[in-house]
Image (cartoon, coloured by chain):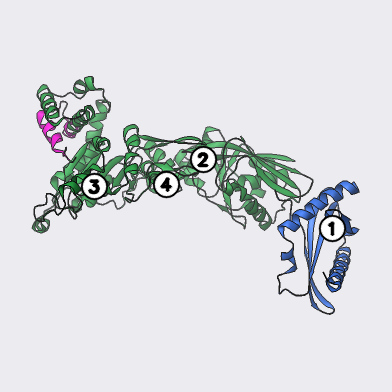
Chain colours: A blue, B green
Amino acid sequence: MTVETNQLGARGEDAAAAYLDRIGMTIVDRNWRCKLGEIDIVALDGTDLVLVEVKTRRSVRRGTPEEAVSTTKQQRIVRLARSYIAEAGLRTAGVRFDVVAITVLAEDRALLRHHRAAFTVSD
Amino acid sequence: MHATVMTATLSGVEALPVEVQADVTSGLPMFSIVGLGDTAVQEARERVRSAIRASGLEFPNARVIINLAPAPLRKHGTGFDLPIALAILVATRQIPTAVVQRVAAVGELSLDGSVRSVPGVLAHAYAAARNDLALLGPSCILPAASAVGGVRYRVVNHIRSLLTEGDYTIAPDASLASDATSVPDLADVAGQESAKRALEVAAAGGHNLLLVGPPGSGKTMLARRLCGILPPLSHDERLETALVHSVAGISEEAVLAGRRPFRSPHHSSSVGGLVGGGAPCRPGEVSLAHNGVLFLDELPEFGPAALQSLRQPLEDGTVTLVRVEGRVTYPARFSLIAAMNPCPCGYLGDSERMCRCSEAAQSRYVSRIGGPLLDRIDMQLRVDRIDPQQIMEAGDTESSVIVARRVAAAREFALEHNRTFAAPGSRLFSEYAIQPLARRTIESYCRTMHLSGRAVTKLARVARTIADIELTDTVSQDHVYEAIRFRLDVS
């Protein structure tokens, strides 16, 4: 991973956090890490705990950013969620998995799509 | 938050009650269905989720567990969509509990929330009536509910309409309408008087019939006219047959209107196709022909396994399929009418064309059918090509309506005398009121022809039917002679 793509990801996560804050969600954690991986954004939306995966792409030439959130990735996020809830000792009414997909259009323009409840635990 | 909705799953021609239990709790969002559902049941998750959302209702962002009880029973089909959606909507208090109380629901969901029909609604209507439940489902439950009679039902074409407590209607006991639509008429057949007579005897006594003749002698044409001279289905027969058609996913409309089924499977049919099978089990052609006619054209061309599989249904009137998951029994009481060429080239015994088959080829051809099956066919008849001259000159012949009247009278006559069809050997002659002279004729014929015990019974039965057509109490020697004419020594 180049420094450039790293920076792109970080900028995307900043933009996503700003957006979620603006629509009234409370950001609880950013880039929460454990040995299983990383959760980009943890937020509270009313009584729900929301775990957000942010995906940023410079072009859709290799598919949309949403497509990059594969089933394997979803399962990893679910596992991460379990350990986050256990560790943070959080008790909320509900849990939700959101995806924020950002496509960069120009130097200062990007398209942001917010998918609420993008996926659930599969069995 | 719990909710329970009743439904049923098909096994044979029966719908076995199944309870759909929904449990919606907080936790990581997931949706799983347990309780031995097949792939179609598992796929219900996607349909239910989309249908609920498309209806402007909310699919819970929570842990959704569906259990199908009793858990050890295998469940199949898409009819679980509607009850699952209902259970979730009741558990999340989006629709009132009263909507699903004392109700059995069945139906497949479209992604847009509309409710689609599923096979076997007639069986579901029966199950609902038996368990004193009202039936909730797509519009196809309406004819089913009225066929069973006295079933309370509510048609739901879209899950949105479930938001309100709807009214249940009691289906009136349907006065099943008769329809006498285009069944081919016997009057269309020129000549062939003895074949027509054979059809009449077969119809009157419920005998199986084999027509042997060269190509173009009108075997198929004759066979197609058997349904037209059989009496219309009785109320109970309609329901029995319609039930089989319903679970097979075939429209039961014609059967409910009293039309006897006529099934003519191609000779490439498999054993499963003929007697039923598959997973889940589906009824075969013999069951779809229940209370009707099964026509097997080109009999020797059928596979040997397929032909031998007909023996049980011919004898018992039912088919019992045993599988790992259990056993199912389908009804299969049908009139068999088979047709075949006398030899591979078709012209053996023809008055104009020479048969080009070797003797070995001829006997191989006939032996494909096998003795045990031939033994179960009461009547065999040679049908010859008739000369074109005769076709042109043929005058008015009897129409099916007239023959049907005689057949109905003969059946009623037989019923009045309360004759059991399978009279045991020793009582056979007294039961059928066979005159001593006629009895001696049967005995000497059987001795010369080396007939089996079963063949004797069949011969006596055919003679009895001929006497029934004449509405005479005793079986005379003439009746026996005519019965012997319907025995052809094919093998």
Q: Mark 2 and mark 4 in contact? Answer it, CB < 8 Å.
A: no
Q: Amino acid at mark 4?
A: Glu
Q: Mark 2 and mark 3 in contact? Answer it, CB < 8 Å.
A: no
Parent chain of label 2: B
Q: Mark 1 and mark 3 in contact? Answer it, CB < 8 Å.
A: no
B41 left or right, relative to B411: right
Quadrant in which residue B38 is drawn: top right
* Mark 3 residue crowding within 10 angstroms, few (<14) / some (14–19) / many (20+): many
The reply to the same-chain question for discs 4 and 3 is yes
**Residue at the disc numbered 4:** B252
Disc 1 versus disc 3: nearer the observer: 1
Parent chain of label 3: B
Look at the image and say whether residue B49 sits in the magenta stretch. no
SS state under label 1: strand
The answer to whether one can see residue B342 in this image is no
The residue lying furthest to the bottom in this view is A107
Query: Can you give x and y, in whole percent of width and height, for residue A91 in the image?
Result: 87, 46
**Residue at the disc numbered 2:** B10
Gap between marks 1 and 4, in whole Å?
57 Å
* First reached walking from the N terminus: tag 2 or tag 3: 2
**Residue at the disc numbered 1:** A39
The reply to the same-chain question for discs 1 and 3 is no
Gap between marks 1 and 3, in whole Å?
74 Å
Q: Amino acid at mark 1?
A: Ile
Q: Mark 1 and mark 2 in contact? Answer it, CB < 8 Å.
A: no
Parent chain of label 1: A
B49 left or right, relative to B78: right
Query: Can you give x and y, in whole percent of width and height, for residue B204 in the image?
Result: 23, 37
Quadrant containing the N terminus of chain B is top right
Instruction: Give, as a single range, the part of the protein colored magenta.
Output: B466-489
